[in-house]
Image (tube, rainbow, N blue to C red):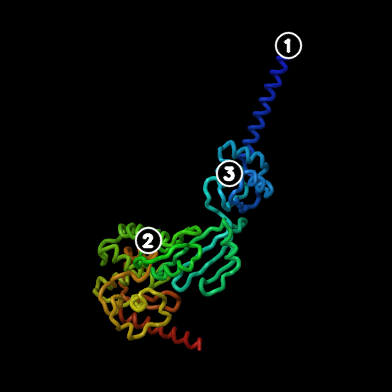
Amino acid sequence: MWRALASNALTILVVGLFLTGGVILWGQSQFKSEGPLETAICLQVKRGSNMTEVSQQLEEDGAISSAVIFRMGADYTDKAGQLKAGSFLVHEGSSMEQIIDKITSSGASTCGSEIEYRIGVTRLQTRVRELDPATLDFVEIANFEVGVDETPAEYTEKRQDADTRYRVSLAEGVTSWQVVEALKGVDALTGDVTEVPAEGMLAPDSYDVRPGDDRVALLQNMQEKQQLRINAVWESRQDGLPISSPEEMLILASIIEKETGVPHERGQVASVFVNRLEKGMRLQTDPTVIYGVTKGQGVLGRGLRQSELRRATPWNTYVIDGLPPTPIANPGLASLQAAVAPEETQYVFFVADGTGGHAFAETLDEHNRNVAKWREIEAERNGSNN
């Protein structure tokens, strides 16, 4: 009898172990396999949340099949205590394993709200956007000019949301003084700026920031990025250029930046200035004259006067030979590259063509004809505006 009981107990134990193993394998399969989510969602993990709360939310949203398996998987992978606060984009079909990796790997939000401060030549524009998980497109919910428009309620609300992401975007061609003045209007940043960075030494780009970040530290980041670009581009320069240093490259790039906003023209504009320098001709470019008038502090807001074109300043390239002593703005990477790799042309003149671009010429006669066409376009426009 005892032998029979022992045999039955052993049988029950084996069956139990077999069933337990089967349950574990099934749970692992559920944890790693494609999830039930049919449309992407933005999962918000608030500060102080735990895996229990997150798993229940995911189950309610239809992103996982079992909150219990989700928590067991988090414990098994030793990630239960690594939960990060933020807004995380959960794609359709994401497995529990993939979701846990996403919400424990970093606190960088991948969806939700974003506030972007865009520093342009004439204004500081603030945009409030929100990612639509279904389309992965940002939907703009507020847009205003700092110091001009009334601050919308949507901006104030998102500023109070701990999961909101922030960016400062710097446009090409903005002067260092303009950048510093604009940063003063970014209320998400802190700290006083006592010194304006050297002209041309701030890299136009997009910078992730956090509320409370220091303005001086952000400017330092911009300077470091620009220096890296300068170093790399200078190393890639063509042979035989009429510029002898990275500083001269930066000056030329800033002039190219201010002369055209048409990307495919940069190489041609660069060729004009390189050809003029090689021939010993004056650059005769209006943006340098304007910089001599404004010193980069604000926008001129009107056309140049004849007296200003004749006035001797260190930046008036109608009066001085060669390059001015400093850059006249902060050039972007494309303009830096154009300065050291201009197109091979014989152009020494260019003028606006009425389309936003320019008409280029090799001879003065051809240039004068282009100028006459531009004057006709100007006259027609002025006539239609009266």
Residue type, mark 1 in image: Trp
Please name the residue that numbered disc 1 is placed on. 2
In-front residue for pair 298/285: 298
Give the percent coordinates (x, y) of residue 65: 67, 43
Crowd band around label 1 with a 10 angstrom C-alpha radius: few (<14), some (14–19), many (20+) = few
Please name the residue that numbered disc 3 is placed on. 100
Task: Provide the secondary structure element on which disc 2 rests.
Answer: helix
Answer left or right for 262 relative to 3.
left
Residue drawn at 53 percent across, 50 percent down: 107
Are the two marked residues, 3 and 2, in contact with CB atoms closer than 8 angstroms? Answer: no
Question: What is the distance, in whole Å, between disc 3 and disc 1 at their CAs?
Answer: 50 Å
Please name the residue that numbered disc 2 is placed on. 223
Q: Which mark is residue 289?
A: none
Residue type, mark 2 in image: Gln
Occupied quadrant, residue 215: bottom left
Q: Is residue 84 visible?
A: yes
Give the percent coordinates (x, y) of residue 89: 58, 52
Crowd band around label 3 with a 10 angstrom C-alpha radius: few (<14), some (14–19), many (20+) = many
Task: Provide the secondary structure element on which disc 1 rests.
Answer: helix
Answer left or right for 179 relative to 363.
right
Q: As displayed, is residue 164 above or below residue 199?
A: above
